[in-house]
Image (tube, helix red, strand yellow):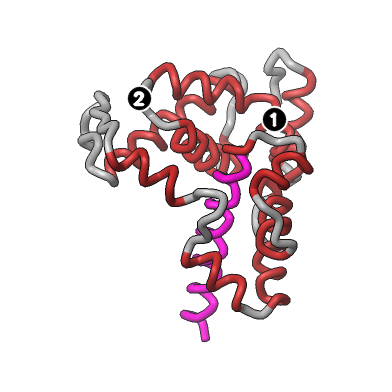
Amino acid sequence: MERTGSKLTDDLIRQAVDGNGTAFTALWDEYIGQLRAYIRGWLKNLDDLYVDDICSRSFEKAFRQIGSFDPRKSQFITWLRTIAHNTALDLLAQEGRVHPRHQTVYLDEGAHVQAVADSIADQDDSALESIIKDENISATSRYIDALPELYREVARRRLLDGMQYKEIAVALDMELNTVRTRIRRAKQMIDNMSKEEEHDI
């Protein structure tokens, strides 16, 4: 692998390619600020929680595709921005907020943005979270263990330990919006794993 110009990044990428989730979490810590700034600068009207959702999804894709990153062609942050750009367009197209063939984003600042924030409010458990709480603890623990490293600890503290979002943010020294976004994505992935198991039975 050729050098990216940063020994830290080079080492972390090498470990992430080998499947080290902790190394990829470190890449998140190193680059999340730049990625957020890029998305906020491009999509100025998006709610912060929505921006974090795009970032989380983009890092998920990057982790799955890390083996295809070529430092000879671009810097790591440039590669991340490309993934985030496409992820944002896909998400907005799914919601009818941008035409999938267009590169111009049309934002609706009204009810949808508020709905996104309300859907992950600290005191308002989602239907999925209620279902998870009612399931066998060992099954929930197994699903959490199968999550990517990025989501595992926040999911364990929320779904098994019952901690509030703010408590998790303080305990892990993490931004509250990041905690909310990671828990939201963890729930979605757990739901998918549960459905896949039911389908296989």
Q: Earlier in the sequence, mark 1 or mark 2?
A: 1
Q: Which numbered marker is on residue 29?
A: 1
Assign the magenta stretch its main secondary structure: helix
Based on the displayed image, in which of its 4 quarters is residue 21 positioned?
Answer: top right
Real-space CA distance between mark 1 and mark 2, rounded to the nearest whole angstrom: 24 Å
Residue 110: percent from the left, percent from the top?
Answer: 27, 35
Q: Is residue 130 left or right of residue 175?
A: left
Q: Quadrant of the N terminus?
A: top right
Q: Judge by depth and name the residue closer to the eye, 129 or 167.
A: 167
Q: Is residue 146 left or right of residue 7?
A: left
* Residue drawn at the location 54% of the way across and 77% of the way down: 197
The amino acid type, in three-letter code, at marker 1 is: Asp
Q: Judge by depth and name the residue closer to the eye, 114 or 135.
A: 114
- SS label for mark 2: loop
Q: Is residue 43 left or right of residue 13?
A: left
Residue 137: percent from the left, percent from the top?
Answer: 70, 76
The amino acid type, in three-letter code, at marker 2 is: Asn
Magenta residues, as a range?
Answer: 178-201
Q: Nearer the viewer, mark 1 or mark 2?
A: 2
- Number of callouts: 2
User: Which class describes the residues within 10 Å of circle 2: few (<14), some (14-19), or many (20+)?
Assistant: some
